[in-house]
Amino acid sequence: MVHNLGTIADVVSRRNVIKTTGAALGIAAFSGAATANRSKGGRGGASEGPHITAHRGYRDVFPQNTVAAVSGAARLGVDRIEIDLEATSDGEIVVFHDARLDDLTDETGLVAETPSEVVRNAEVLDSGETIPTLAETLSATRPPVTMNLEFKDRGPLSWEEFAKRTLDVAYQYPGAFYASSFDHDAIRAVREIDPSVDVAPIFGSDTDENLAVARELDAEALNCSTGVLDEELVETAHEEGRAVNVWTIDSWREAKTPIELGVDGLIADYPQMATFGNDEDLRGYRDR
């Protein structure tokens, strides 16, 4: 089934978002994803196996952080989708990962120093897709799934203004969402504006510091790298009523240990990572 992944991306564009019914339905049927957790960030331990978050909308299947990516991932039946948020020079909230446009688009320069008109017309990875606004991205996520809104770069805005503009758009989305960030001040700003919005610190080091921030903000989740994940972290988080989501899962081998440790979510670049992370399911796949 994994041999069909490349064909999906080949036929995706803004005008033809996803019509890959054979490959897409095949992957969805064999994805092995747990029942979707629709409670935003999510608290507590994983009782039915980890939910799956499509990292940048399954960046190794679709052109990352685009309308095609979120639409395609949602139609594949993913539990959640992670997208990256940045502000342009005129304060538009767009969905893009890098600080600079150079590596992922046909434009150059810092997103934070480039007007939204230029940013929004930049083509992503020669795909025919352009950088979308947050509003366009959420409008394309159908059926609605839980969105992990990663606050990446505030540009010319304060984190308070960035959070306000982001939440004003997110409130219109019919699905659940939560805010995450490597920058603690970003999720502090979300909490100050609306304490009801779930938040999660993201980290790949300084576990103790991030646990302290999670306690300070009563964060619903911890989004940690595979490099810092261990049994103690999972047990501590669950004892405190926090979910653990681990990034970035690129293979079933990388999924195996987090699943055994009882994490709540896998943030993955491909579908079916939870299925292949389970030895019993893998044996079943070989028998097919």
Image: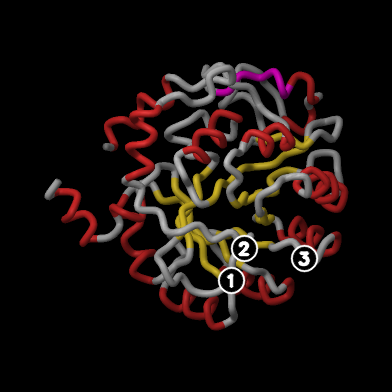
Image x and y of residue 275, in percent: 31, 54
Magenta residue check for 61 = no
Is disc 1 placed on a helix, strand or loop?
A: loop
Q: Residue 196 carries which label?
A: 3
Image x and y of residue 105, in percent: 60, 22
Is disc 3 placed on a helix, strand or loop?
A: loop
Q: Give the CA distance from mark 1 to mark 2.
A: 8 Å
Residue positioned 52% across, 61% down in the render: 224
Provide the residue span drawn in magenta: 119-124
Q: Residues within 10 Å of mark 1 (few under 14, many from 20)?
A: many
Inspect the image, locate mark 3, and give the three-letter code of the amino acid beneath it: Ser
Q: Give the CA distance from mark 3 to mark 1.
A: 14 Å
Image x and y of residue 135, in percent: 74, 36
Disc 2 vs disc 3: which is toward the camera?
2
**177 versus 91 height, above or below:** below
Q: Give the CA distance from mark 2 to mark 3.
A: 12 Å
Image x and y of residue 197, in percent: 74, 61
**59 versus 149 height, above or below:** above
Residues at circles 3 and 1 in contact by the CB criterion of under 8 Å: no
Q: Residue 43 carries which label?
A: 1
Earlier in the chain: of badge 2 and badge 3, it is 2
Residues at circles 1 and 2 in contact by the CB criterion of under 8 Å: yes
Inspect the image, locate mark 2, and give the three-letter code of the amino acid beneath it: Ser
Q: Mark 2 points at which residue?
A: 39
Q: Main secondary structure of the magenta part?
A: loop
**Horizontally, is 29 left or right of 112 in the view?**
left
